[in-house]
Image (tube, rainbow, N blue to C red):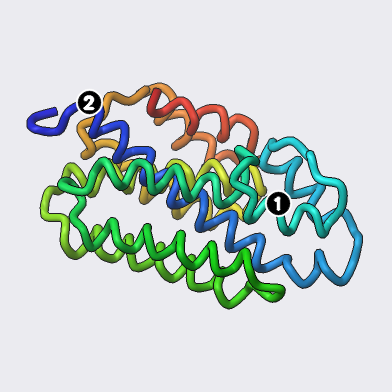
Amino acid sequence: MGIISIDQVDHLYWLGRYTERVYTTLMIFAKNFDLMIDADNGIYQNFCVSLDIPDIYQSKEDFIRRYAFDDSVPDSIISNLNRAYDNAIVLRETIGSDALSYVQLSIYAMNNAAKSNSPLIELQQVMDDLLSFWGIVDDQIDADQIRNIIKAGKRIERIDLYARLEIERSRLEREVRRMIPRVLRSGMKYNENSLNAVSSLILEESLDYEGLITNVESIIS
């Protein structure tokens, strides 16, 4: 791994995964926010089933507040954002203070959203801050390996989430095409069989979402 320690590799990989997890789940949460408020049609229950997270919520209102903002809930958006920050803070010298600052700003925006009765503007700011973080990664991190590790984690997480949510094939195919070279160039140890399985599964006539989830989760052990 050259000058990158095993611990740094792990932190970089999970920084990519957690920032993506927050971005995608928050995007879907925001998209369905008004529907969850206006109707009781099982949206949040289906969301929990799709992501394989426990439905510990008493109502749609309870879900809206706690899934987004309760840091005592391990699967909440804020808990995953805090995990992203925990990885970023130990990587300050590796990713730079500008990249770290955007993860910090996303937490500030999330805390502001928690205080609001209409949090969608602040939640959009969280997503914008994460997009800025990824832009800084591209623009200011010179080491190819560091960028590739972060983006391998990001793409693996996105494929995992998209498969769980049964996103259309074309979007999954695009993410698989973008994920494979990142993994190959990252220098991380990876499961070649799982990587090949993901490449094959995405081309099958009948898309096996469960098989895709199992294999993408096994690429990096």
Q: Secondary structure at mark 2?
A: helix
Image x and y of residue 174, in percent: 45, 55
Pointer 1: what residue? Answer: 66
In the displayed orientation, state which residue is furthest to the right. Answer: 40
Which residue lies at the image location 78% right of the left edge and 40% below the top edge?
55
Amino acid type, callout 1 = Arg
Q: Which of the 4 image quarters holds residue 50?
A: top right
Q: How many marks?
A: 2
Marks 1 & 2, CB-CB < 8 Å contact: no
- Amino acid type at image mark 2: Ile
User: In the rendered view of the protein, which quadrant contains the N terminus?
Assistant: top left
Q: Is residue 215 left or right of residue 151?
A: right
Which disc is residue 6 wearing?
Answer: 2
For the C terminus, the quadrant is top left
Please state if 51 lies on the left or on the right of 189 as rendered.
right
Q: Residue at image x 54%, y 35%?
A: 201
Residue at 67% x, 42% y: name it: 51
Q: Sequence-wise, which precedes: disc 1 or disc 2?
A: 2
In what element is the residue under mark 1?
helix
x, y percentage for residue 157?
47, 43
Distance, label 1 to label 2, CA atoms, is 34 Å
Please tell me whether mark 1 or mark 2 is closer to you in this view: 1
Does residue 107 appear to the left or right of 132 in the view shown?
A: right
Crowding around mark 2 (Cα neighbors within 10 Å: few <14, some 14 to 19, many 20+) is: few
- Indicate which disc residue 165 carries: none
